[in-house]
Image: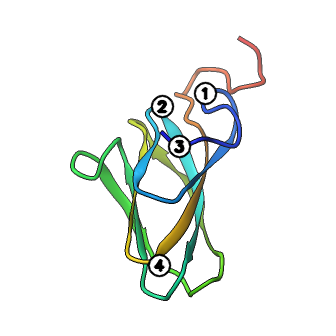
Amino acid sequence: MAPVGVSRERTAGWTRLTASDIVTTHPVALHGVVIRVTTTGGLASVYAGTDATAGRLIGSFTGTANVSNPVTFPQPIACEHGLYAELAGTVAELTLVYSPLVPPGLPTPGQGT
């Protein structure tokens, strides 16, 4: 799995990918993505789950060449079974921003036990 910006389990985090990979196997809420392609036409598909076959497609994203193209969602997207990204064509990198998905009734990170 790809390295992350901070702890996957307890706080918000980000992961930068340069190839298709599992982002996390933990339940998370996806807040947005940033895609950068070397030439216009690259495609990054993001799935709620640990692969493209069993996962639910969240979206497929393209970008303008050599520009960071951010996509944020009005509400975080629940990914109960992890997060997977598939990079194709001229995608140079994809950064995914997410936080732990906390079931209702449980304290959020930082609120104690």
Residue 30 higher or lower than 37, as above or below: above
Disc 3 target residue: 2
Question: N-terminal of the two: label 4 or label 3?
Answer: 3
Residue 67 in the figure: left or right of residue 112: left
CB-based contact (under 8 Å), mark 1 and mark 2: yes
Badge 2 density bin: few <14, some 14–19, many ≥20, Cα 10 Å: some
Query: Of all residues shown, which one is farthest toward the left?
Result: 53
Badge 4 density bin: few <14, some 14–19, many ≥20, Cα 10 Å: some
Disc 2 target residue: 26
**Could you tell me how far apart the alpha carbons at marks 4 and 3 are, in whole angstroms?**
21 Å
**Could you tell me how far apart the alpha carbons at marks 4 and 1 are, in whole angstroms?**
29 Å
**Could you tell me how far apart the alpha carbons at marks 3 and 2 are, in whole angstroms?**
14 Å
Question: N-terminal of the two: label 1 or label 2?
Answer: 1
- Count of numbered labels shown in the rendering: 4
The residue at 55%/50% (across/down) is 30
**Could you tell me how far apart the alpha carbons at marks 4 and 2 are, in whole angstroms?**
26 Å
Badge 1 density bin: few <14, some 14–19, many ≥20, Cα 10 Å: some
The residue at 48%/72% (across/down) is 91
Kind of residue at badge 4:
Thr
Residue 100 picture location, percent across and down: 59, 35
Kind of residue at badge 1:
Glu
Q: Residue 62 carries which label?
A: 4
Q: Is mark 2 on a helix, strand or loop?
A: loop
Residue 19 higher or lower than 3, as above or below: below
Quarter of the image with the C terminus in it: top right
Disc 1 target residue: 9
**Could you tell me how far apart the alpha carbons at marks 1 and 2 are, in whole angstroms?**
7 Å
Q: What element carries label 4?
A: loop
Q: What element carries label 1?
A: loop
